[in-house]
Image (cartoon, rainbow, N blue to C red):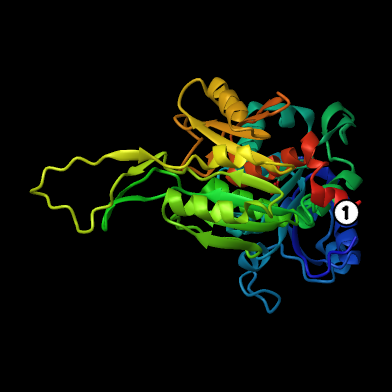
Amino acid sequence: MNFTGKKITVGITGGIAAYKAADIVSWLKQSGADVSVAMTASACKIITPLTLKVLSGKPVATDINSLSSDWNVPHIDLAATDLFVVVPATANIIAKVAHGIADEIVSAAILATNAPLLFAPAMHTDMYNNPATQANLELLAKRGCKFVEPGSGRLACGAVGKGRLADIEDIKEAITDALLPKQLLQGLKVIVTAGPTHEYIDPFRYISNCSSGKMGYALAAAAAAAGAQVELISGPCQLATSLNVKVTNVVSARQMAAEVFARYNDADIVIMAAAVADYRPEVIADHKIKKTTETTVNFVATTDILNELGKSKGKKLLIGFAAETEDLTDYAQQKLQQKNLDLIIANNISQPGAGFSCDTNIITAISAEGETQQWPQMSKQSVAAKIIELITDLPRFAALPSKKEEK
Ligand SMILES: Cc1cc2nc3c(=O)[nH]c(=O)nc-3n(C[C@H](O)[C@H](O)[C@H](O)COP(=O)(O)O)c2cc1C
């Protein structure tokens, strides 16, 4: 493994398996990562910070108030990382992170970090099964945290049940996946559309919808992280793009259609996540329409981009979204067939936690082969990563010309 150039923070909390974190830290260091370690007071009673200092080659943070020459502000320094791993993760740290508590070095650094979070929980079976712990785990999963599931077997206290720290090799694999995402789309060209469109009535007024663009931007980032060459055609949004995504900004449905059609021939995969207006004003007034004038605006249908793409799909993969408020699966299935899609991602936009503006989504994914998957509420980043994985499982994915050239 080569983690050269990667920064990783390992939080160690007070589970009896804390000594096993030493192996992880040693492996990370040997793999070239820049490893920082933070330990709770309980963890320090189980394994000494000295051991972790020797293995990581750096001072270990154990005190949030320690402003020595080793740290500027310790919890903020630890938060600036590519990945934050908590191994073992006690019931206590899971509860604290779920509720935003920051009363010692590990929880404070986690609250301050924007890095992906990976927990390896370990605790007595009764603590694990406790509804409070389960609710906290669910809350964290919804926010996009990742877990290495504890195993079942003999626990340190002699009892038998679920709660043992996962196998070290499984934890290493989860860290590797998080630090070096698999390049599932290496060499492929992907078009993603995102956001709403604005259909102008006069130079100062338009009709639009509530799309924030978050789902499409998350998909573009996930496709780029998977190694694809990504072109994002974006309606008006206030979002930052990830570094490896080429963005073309458009305003209207007509412009969106033109930009997508211009790139279509070259693409391997097209993901239409934009909420493109179905209608536009027939005429755009040259001047601001006066308040005194009684006005009727006639609307005409915009080009159905997905429908046009479906007609000349060739060997490409075409993925559409269905934002519905009723009969979700029926409408989605109809749209999948009518538009010749390979996969449709349906969401009920009237459901709390799903749809346009929020940070999470609740998805039903239906493939052309008829396979239906329902996913629980998840962050849009997690949904995007799952959609990319699902695309690579589609039977037509292996038949993409660019994949064949590779062989
Ligand atoms: C010997 C011993 C082993 C423990 N093992 C665990 C454990 O595996 N998982 C857990 O959640 N708590 C375990 N605990 C309880 C935690 O140490 C306790 O909840 C503590 O407050 C956790 O603090 P921390 O999360 O700040 O490290 C253990 C306690 C002792 C004394």
Judge left or right: residue 293 versus residue 189.
left
Q: Is residue 3 visible?
A: yes
The crowding category of the residue bearing disc 1, from other C-alpha atoms within 10 Å (few below 14, some 14 to 19, many at least 20), is: few
Is 293 drawn above or below residue 106 in the view shown?
above
Number of marks = 1
The residue at 64%/55% (across/down) is 221
Residue lying at 63% horizontally and 75% vertically, measured from the top left: 72
In the image shown, does 130 or 366 lie closer to the viewer?
366
| Residue farthest left in this picture | 292
Q: Is residue 360 left or right of residue 343?
A: left
Question: Extreme bottom residue here?
Answer: 69
Residue 326 image point, x, y percent: 47, 22
Residue 198 in the image, given as x and y percentages of width and height: 38, 50
Q: Is mark 1 within 8 Å of ligand 1?
A: no
Q: Which three-letter amino acid code belongs to the residue tagged 1? A: Glu
Residue 117 x %, y %: 69, 51
Q: Quadrant of ligand 1?
A: top right
Q: Nearer the viewer, residue 74 or 30?
A: 30
Local secondary structure at mark 1: helix
Residue situated in front as seen by the camera: 235 or 373 = 235
The picture quadrant where one finds residue 209 is top left
- The residue beneath circle 1 is 406
Whole-percent x, y for residue 71 in the image: 67, 74
- Above or below: residue 76 compared with residue 217: below
* Drawn side of residue 48 relative to residue 217, left or right: right
123, 36: nearer the viewer: 36
In this image, 8 relative to 346: left or right?
Answer: right
Above/below status of 366 relative to 167: above
Q: Is residue 121 visible?
A: no
Q: Quadrant of residue 44?
A: bottom right
What residue is at 66 percent from the left and 57 percent from the top?
Answer: 230
